[in-house]
């Protein structure tokens, strides 16, 4: 029987959301700097800042939604039935909506 550990579980939704928000905020802060840079830039710098201001929102969403922590990690979900070594099946946790029929 394979044992499950707490390290095989994914990050909590709150932790995952916080991580994505930090990545997105950093990218959008760089975009704001690009927009301010457009006010003072001349020559090729103007094109670089314009490209950053236009394309950073797209890349910010992609970078924020990439989950780098799950690469190569198999997240296991415990099932409702646990098979013992002798082949017998043991019922898992009982749901409240099941009847005693």
Image (cartoon, rainbow, N blue to C red):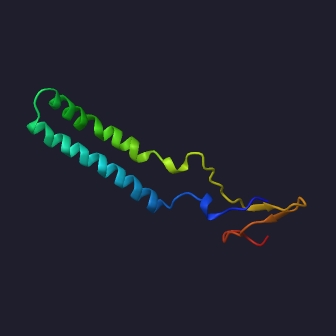
Q: Is residue 17 left or right of residue 8?
A: left
Residue at screen point 19% across, 44% down: 33
Q: Is residue 61 left or right of residue 101?
A: left
- Residue 55, x across and y down, in percent: 28, 35
Q: How many marks?
A: 0
Check the image and report above or below for 46 versus 95: above
| Residue located farthest toward the top when viewing the structure as drawn | 43
Q: Is residue 79 left or right of residue 85?
A: left
**Viewer-side residue, 68 vs 89:** 68
- Residue 10, x across and y down, in percent: 56, 57
Check the image and report above or below for 99 versus 32: below
Quadrant for the N terminus, please: bottom right
Residue at screen point 9% across, 38% down: 39
Rendering quarter of residue 2: bottom right
Rendering quarter of residue 84: bottom right
Residue at screen point 15% across, 31% down: 46
Q: Is residue 83 left or right of residue 69?
A: right
| Residue located farthest toward the right when viewing the structure as drawn | 86
**Viewer-side residue, 53 vs 49:** 49
Residue at screen point 67% across, 69% down: 97
- Residue 65, x across and y down, in percent: 43, 46
Rendering quarter of residue 45: top left
**Viewer-side residue, 80 vs 74:** 74
- Residue 66, x across and y down, in percent: 45, 45
């Amino acid at each position: 029987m394979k044992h499950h550990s707490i390290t095989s579980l994914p990050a909590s939704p709150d932790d995952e959301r916080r991580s994505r928000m930090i990545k997105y905020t950093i990218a959008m802060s760089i975009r704001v700097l690009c927009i301010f840079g457009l006010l003072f830039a001349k020559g090729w710098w103007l094109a670089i800042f314009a490209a950053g201001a236009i394309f950073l929102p797209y890349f910010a969403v992609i970078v924020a939604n990439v989950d780098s922590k799950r690469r190569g990690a198999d997240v296991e979900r415990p099932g409702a039935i646990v098979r013992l070594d002798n082949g017998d099946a043991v019922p898992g946790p009982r749901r409240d909506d099941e009847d005693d029929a």
